[in-house]
Image (tube, grey):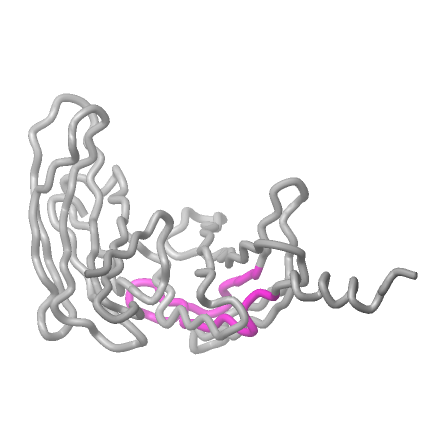
Amino acid sequence: MADWGASRGEAAACLHSVPNRSTGVAVCDKKVLHNVLVELYEKDTMNPDDLLAHIHTNANGEFQLYGEHDEAGYIRPYLRVRHNCHAKPNCARIAEYQIPQSALGDVYDMTFLTLDIKVAGETEGIAVCQKKRLSNVKIELWDRDTLDPNDLLSTVFTNGDGEFTITGGEDEVGKIEPFIRVTHNCKTKPYCQRIGDFEVPQEKIDGTYDMTYLTLDIAVSGEKEKCM
C-alpha cells in the first residue's frame, strides 16, 4: 500500500509562500500620497497572474499588504501600483515592482515608494535606505550604445545628507539613451555591493530629472550584486 502520508509531506515541502507583509510609504513630489492602489500578485507563466491582495494607502501614504500563495516550485511575487502622480487628467499610471526572492516569507519594507521618478541635462535626488539618507553612494550617468560599449558621462557620490546632482552631455547622431547607474551597500551581504540601473525618460533629456527619493531598499529589474 502506498504511503500517502509521506507523499503529502513531500508535496508540502515544495510549496512556497510570498512575503508575510509588504510595507511602504507612497510619495509624489516629496509629499505622501493617499488612496494609491497597491496590489500583490504572483506571476504565472502559463496562466493569468494571481491577485493575492490589494489595499489603498492611508492619509499618511502608508500601506501594509499581506498575502500568501501556495505553489509547487519557484514563485515570482510582485507589487502593482496604480496612482495619479504626474499623470494626465483622468488618467492613472501603473507600475510594477518585483519582490526579491530573499524577502519571501518575511517582511518586505519598500520604505519610500517614490512614484514621480521625473534628468538629463541635470539629475538630482536623495538616496535613502531603511528610511535614512545614505551618504557615499556612487552615482554614474551613462549613455547606452547598441554596437559600442556604453559611454560613462559623469560620476558623483552622494553627500552627507544623501543628496546628489549629476550633469553630463553627449554628442551623438540620432537618439541617445541615458541612464543612471547606482552602486551602494543598502541591505547587502558583507563585502558586497548592489548595482542598479535607472532609465532617464526621453522627455527629460536637456531638462532636469528630479528622482526625489531614490529608495535603494527596492530591487530594480536587472540589478546585480558584486562581492569582493
Q: Residue at x 9, y 62 (%)?
A: 157
Q: Which residues are magenta?
A: 17-40
Taking the view exactly as shown, the residue that stands out farthest to the front is: 1
**Nearest to the observer: residue 150 or residue 10:** 10
Q: Residue at x 40, y 67 (%)?
A: 26
Which quadrant would the N terminus be assigned to in this image? bottom right
Q: Is residue 219 magenta?
A: no
Looking at the image, is 23 positioned above or below residue 52?
A: below
Q: Residue at x 15, y 64 (%)?
A: 137
Which quadrant would the C terminus be assigned to in this image? bottom left
Percent of width and height locating residue 107: 48, 74
The quarter holding residue 108 reads bottom left
The quarter holding residue 8 reads bottom right
Percent of width and height locating residue 214: 26, 62
Q: Is residue 113 left or right of residue 21?
A: left
Q: Is residue 1 left or right of residue 194?
A: right
Taking the view exactly as shown, the residue that stands out farthest to the top is: 173
Q: Is residue 65 left or right of residue 113?
A: right
Looking at the image, is 220 positioned above or below residue 187?
A: above
**Nearest to the observer: residue 193 or residue 124:** 193
